[in-house]
Amino acid sequence: MKEGSLDAPIRHAVQWQDENFYSTDKLDEELRRVFDVCHGCRRCFNLCDSFPKLFDLIDESDSGELDTVASADFEPIVDACTLCDMCYLTKCPYVPPHEFNIDFPHLMLRYRAVQFRNGQTPFVNKELTKTDRNGKAFGKIASIVNWGSNVENSIPRKLLETTCNVHRDASLPKFHKQAFLETNKNREKSVNSKAPGYGRKAVVYATCFVNYNNPSIGTSALNVLNTNGVETEVVYPSCCGMPQLEQGNIADVARAAEKVAKELRIWVDKGNDIIALTPSCALMLKFEWPLILPDNEDVKVLSSATYDIDEYIVEIAKKEGLVDGLKPLDGGITLHHACHSRAQNFGQKSVEMLKFIPDVDLTVIERCSGHGGSWGMMKDNYETALKVGKPAARQAKNASSTYVASGCPLAAEHILQGMEALDGNKPNVEKATHPIELLAKAYGF
């Protein structure tokens, strides 16, 4: 038996279609096995709140070991996991193929899947994950919804906190009356035939966040891609299912994967690359879907054809070269390296991409923002999210950059809130941005 492993990590398929997966006894047995290994190792103590909760629970038990910890006390440990995958990717020496076979995030996913199967997932949580329905509905009354969700409007935010358990101080994404997909239909395409990368074809998978909440990311991506000779189409069959995955609703994730992969496979067969505009969605298409539907050929093909937007721009730069014309941006850039970008294990593509901007003053943060998808917005988690993200907020505050960016714009927004929480002063930053927006700005868009 090896103490740790230097072998390349592998990940096993999620056995969500096996009834043993939902056995509470077998789940408890696996939780205790894994928690006992974690208790003896503790390398992950500083990653997120799950591990401090686990270690405190054991240390404060009668025996100081796992045998005197009640299984009913495991739930807060699971609730604190944001499925960021950082423990699996960067810390744990016992991930497969090591014989201990530790995959902490997918064990937390299994726990939530059992909760979901047993009807223990809160109704509000399930409704908040319906991003396509919510995006379409709220887009029709976007001005009202955006007014009500503003943190400065105390009465509607208190009501939202009471009814939906969303913390009154958490910054929430805005909605747009016209979705990105609809906006793009009227967009005049102009592909630069003189660009070194001319001849590439790509389909931009809009993602629910870009489609309903931040079309600027999509517009910026199309401008940069077309400028660099890439012929583009925008496609959005439905959400990738990441919000449902967070709640353990794996069956709905599988249905989304089948639907989206089937439609995008058609484009892949026509010679198109697939580009996801946010790292969480890229992670789903590339890694999570193949583990949930390992025998689905559409999912397999799509996985190998998918790129994160920043990853794709860097590939163009390295293989063909980017079009000249990038200009310096006034003020520095603080870039948060999003966890789901890191989880794709392709290196610091956002960093590489932003370094193409002449004379760029770049500060890179590789600490957790504390946001964790919808997790950091919830009433029970918001204060903890600020605490976890405090080191990142402090780095950003010290950098005093003009721009704060992240592949996950919600993470960047959370960092801005963390910066304000440090001393009560709002940072002098117009808005949280995606790196592709800054590259587009450097091109003059």
Image: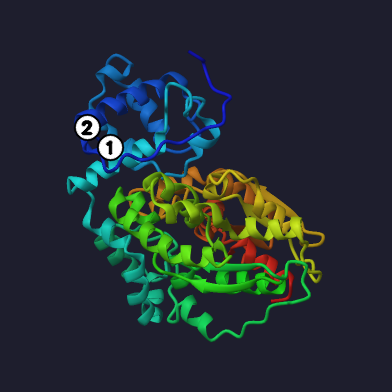
Q: Residue at 55%, 56% (x, y): give it.
A: 305
Q: Residue at 32%, 70% (x, y): give it.
A: 133
Q: Quadrant of residue 189?
A: bottom right
Disc 1 + disc 2, Cβ < 8 Å: yes
Name the residue that disc number 1 marks: 75
Amino acid carrying mark 2 in the image: Ala
Q: Residue at 43%, 18% (x, y): give it.
A: 40
Answer above or below: position of 376 versus 268: above
Please give the label number shown on residue 26: none
Give the quarter of the figure containing the C terminus: bottom right
Is any atom of residue 250 visible in this view?
yes
Q: Residue at 71%, 72% (x, y): give it.
A: 229
Answer above or below: position of 178 versus 25: below
Q: Residues within 10 Å of mark 1 (few under 14, many from 20)?
A: few
Q: Position of residue 43 (x, y in %)?
A: 51, 26
- Element under label 1? helix
- Of the pair 362 and 193, the residue shown nearer to us: 193
Amino acid carrying mark 1 in the image: Glu
Please give the label number shown on residue 72: 2
Answer above or below: position of 28 versus 434: above
Q: Position of residue 265 (x, y in %)?
A: 47, 62
Q: Position of residue 49 (x, y in %)?
A: 42, 38
Kindly report the distance in space between the C-alpha atoms of the residues bearing marks 1 and 2: 7 Å
- Element under label 2? helix
Q: Residues within 10 Å of mark 2 (few under 14, many from 20)?
A: few
Q: Position of residue 316 (x, y in %)?
A: 71, 60
